[in-house]
Amino acid sequence: MISDLVIIGGGASGFMGAITAISSGLRSVVILESTSKVLEKVRISGGGRCNLTNSCWDIPNLVDNYPRGEKQLISLFNRFSTTEAFDWFQKKGLSLKIEKDGRVFPRSDSSDEVIKCLTSVAKNSGVKVFTNSHVKNISPKRKGFDVLVKGGIHFEANNILICTGGHPSGRRLAKTLGHSIIQPVPSLFSFTISENSLKSCSGITLDVQVKLTVDKKKYSGTGPILITHKGFSGPLILRLSAFSARNLHANKYIGKLIINWLCMSEKKVRSEIDLYKLVNGKKFLLNNKPFKQLPKSLWNALLLSAKIDSQLKWADLSKKDKESLVKCLIMKSYSINSRGPFGEEFVTAGGISLKEINFKTMESRICKGLFFAGEVIDIDGITGGFNFQHCWTSGWVAGNSMVPLKA
Ligand SMILES: Cc1cc2nc3c(=O)[nH]c(=O)nc-3n(C[C@H](O)[C@H](O)[C@H](O)COP(=O)(O)OP(=O)(O)OC[C@H]3O[C@@H](n4cnc5c(N)ncnc54)[C@H](O)[C@@H]3O)c2cc1C
């Protein structure tokens, strides 16, 4: 039997594509999944809670969270964005909540509920799911496609939707069908630095301003960073890692960070120091600081980096010492020497070239009847639910764009 649609990959985008396709009128929709379990990434995502989207409802702001695909996502989000995804899941019976930082989770805090929702809606709509079905080859025929599954089983389909995530096999299948692939590189990772003066500060999270330079290219941002025992992580660092992913990879993960630990102007820092010195001249620099927001261990580490004796009294702080302290507080430089571990989430930057996809339909511009959705495409977001949002959106648009097989 020829199916209206065969979907390769039973992840977030595959399920959204399948459910949408069948509700838009396709009669026979099949999902082929390599492993023994579908939606495995949904299960482990968000530390087992699944951060499935974000309450960033405004499309121009939303697309700022995508280092790759920003332009293409504008038209996609105009059709199915965070608002629509939020409503879609609630209407399917999944109760959601929005956290203070805008991330959206199931009210139960359990990714299993997301899986239950997607699998039961798919089953009730008549989507057929085959696990342990690794797709080895797709051959276009005069009408439709032949899909070869490991073990020698064949499926026939009028349309194909490739939703294989960051797995190399999907990119390989697309390549054999004529697509070019943007080299996949990792995104959303922490930085390891050469300097070890911050070892005692590991575990501290602080809002800072950061300037990152990678081979002359500059990136910057303000937000929370986490000091780790080997370098830096936290939301701002993960964001910078995503925007610089390609450059950092090309530059062998060598770069320079300049941190303003106080998010203050030089003028303001100088005047705060002068005032503090005037009032607290008899106090030791050790543990006595003008900047309340700086944790003690970080203050002491920065004094050490500035080569200032912490046993000094404020009244004895020389002009030279003050200069060096100001520099360490607001323009301290750290050398990145390698990629650190991933945060809670990681994605692949790269995949099917955006030029070869029609973003009105998610159909290939090269092979008629072939569609793509999710991480397999050269689109990725930062942490916060943006990666799943792209999967729901591209899966929904693809599922709504297919023509049923004429009887
Ligand atoms: C630890 C972790 C936590 C994350 N947490 C979040 C989060 O909280 N929020 C968020 O937005 N994003 C998160 N992400 C990112 C998010 O999981 C991915 O962006 C998303 O899962 C991609 O969905 P997809 O459908 O494109 O691919 P996937 O979910 O990767 O699904 C692809 C499926 O295709 C199957 N497959 C591959 N090749 C074949 C083949 N040849 N034949 C048949 N099947 C095949 C795979 O087995 C897999 O099941 C996280 C990622 C990780 C690694």
Image (spheres, grey):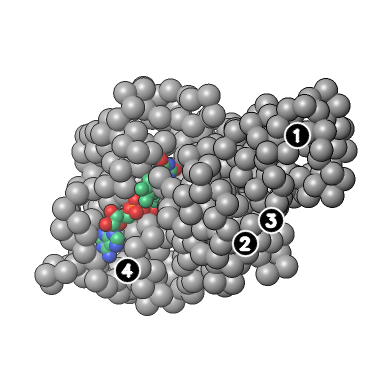
In the image shown, does 59 or 190 lie closer to the viewer? Answer: 190
Compared to residue 375, the image places residue 168 above or below, namely below
Please state if 3 lies on the left or on the right of 276 as rendered: left
Q: Quadrant of the C terminus?
A: bottom left
Q: Which residue is mark 2?
A: 335
Spatial separation of the CA atoms under disc 4 and disc 2:
36 Å
Q: Which residue is mark 3?
A: 333
Question: Is residue 301 in view from this perspective?
Answer: yes
Q: Which residue is mark 1?
A: 313
Query: Around disc 1, counting alpha carbons within 10 Å, would you say few (fewer than 14), some (14 to 19), or many (20 or more)?
Result: some
Eye-nearest disc, 4 or 2: 2
Spatial separation of the CA atoms under disc 1 and disc 3:
26 Å
**Chain-order first, disc 4 or disc 2:** 4
Please state if 256 lies on the left or on the right of 199 as rendered: right
Classify mark 1: helix, strand or loop.
loop
Mark 4 Cβ inside 8 Å of ligand 1: yes
